[in-house]
Image (cartoon, rainbow, N blue to C red):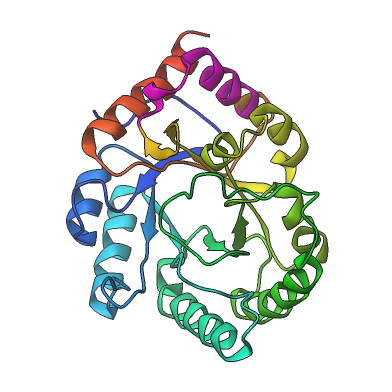
Amino acid sequence: MEKSHLKLPFRVGTTSMVFGDDLLENAGLLVRMVDNIEIVLFHTPTLHNIPTTEEIHALKKIGEEEDVTFTVHLPASLEVAAPDREKRMKSVQLAREILLRTAELEPMYYILHVPFSPPTLVSTPGLYFEFEDSPGWDEWTNRTLESLEILHNVSGNASKLLVENINYSTRFLEPFLENGFCELCLDLGHLILGQEEVMDHLKQYLAATREIHLHGVDGHEEHLSLSRLPEDRVQEWLRYIHKSSFQGVITLEVFSPRDLEESLEVVSKSFFNE
């Protein structure tokens, strides 16, 4: 599927792992399909894909030639709010190094997870924190603010660094937004997993949101095609986002060609059918 010719105020993107793991191969294929590529990074004992300087140069050239922008999703394994200070500072230092290394790309945004429970790469059934779950959150907030201040000083712009709602209510992120160190990446799939009302969150948080993650959810399985969700609901969300003059990025956070094709089709239908 080629890029849509829809004139939308926001950019539509996807992940850098739709066509396998090779970053440059994905970029070369995705430039014909999307406006933005979310570079999804990992840093674990068995998975490490932080791009080299040469890869950064190549990506920059692709972006300039094809009018494609980038966002950088920092490794989900980072623990910038860990109770252990040494672990916390190691995560902050790695995030800082990635920000500096990828600065040449001039990413629109950097996406950061701030785990409260131990970080995982998949959703954990039943592990979703409501706002009433208060023990330990004040300390978590203070540790996070300390880390965000360091990263904010590196990025130099609150709108560049985005914190993402993961397995907890978006309300837990409000102190960070109010402090001015970052803005919001609103993951609608995570809201569905937490059985939260997506439209309520869009109305409350869209003004502070710079990137939206959109993907299908089925039970506790996420990052699926948008075709797995009721089409009328997805269209309602997208049309509200459009009519609210959102000017950031909507990332179709999927990881296979078929899921991307189907998701792009859902997005197109949301506007062609208006």
The answer to whether residue 234 is seen in the rendering is: yes
Is 154 on the left or on the right of 259, as rendered? right
Which quarter of the figure is the N terminus placed in? top left
- Total marks drawn? 0
| Place of residue 39 in the rendered image (x, y in percent of width and height, measured from the top left) | 37, 59
Above or below, comparing residue 12 to residue 103 in the picture: above
| Place of residue 223 in the rendered image (x, y in percent of width and height, measured from the top left) | 39, 40
Is 55 on the left or on the right of 81, as rendered? left
**Front one among 215 and 184:** 215
Decide whether residue 91 is among the magenta residues.
no
Q: Residue, x 47% and y 82% (percent of image)?
A: 94
Magenta highlight range: 225-241
| Place of residue 150 in the rendered image (x, y in percent of width and height, measured from the top left) | 66, 82
Above or below, comparing residue 119 to residue 93 in the picture: above
Magenta: main secondary structure equals helix
Write down the quadrant of residue 41 in the picture: bottom left
Decide whether residue 237 is among the magenta residues.
yes
Is 212 on the left or on the right of 100, as rendered? right
Above or below, comparing residue 273 to residue 123 in the picture: above
| Place of residue 155 in the rendered image (x, y in percent of width and height, measured from the top left) | 60, 74
**Front one among 45 and 132:** 132
Q: Residue, x 29% and y 63% (percent of image)?
A: 59
Q: Residue, x 55% and y 74% (percent of image)?
A: 79
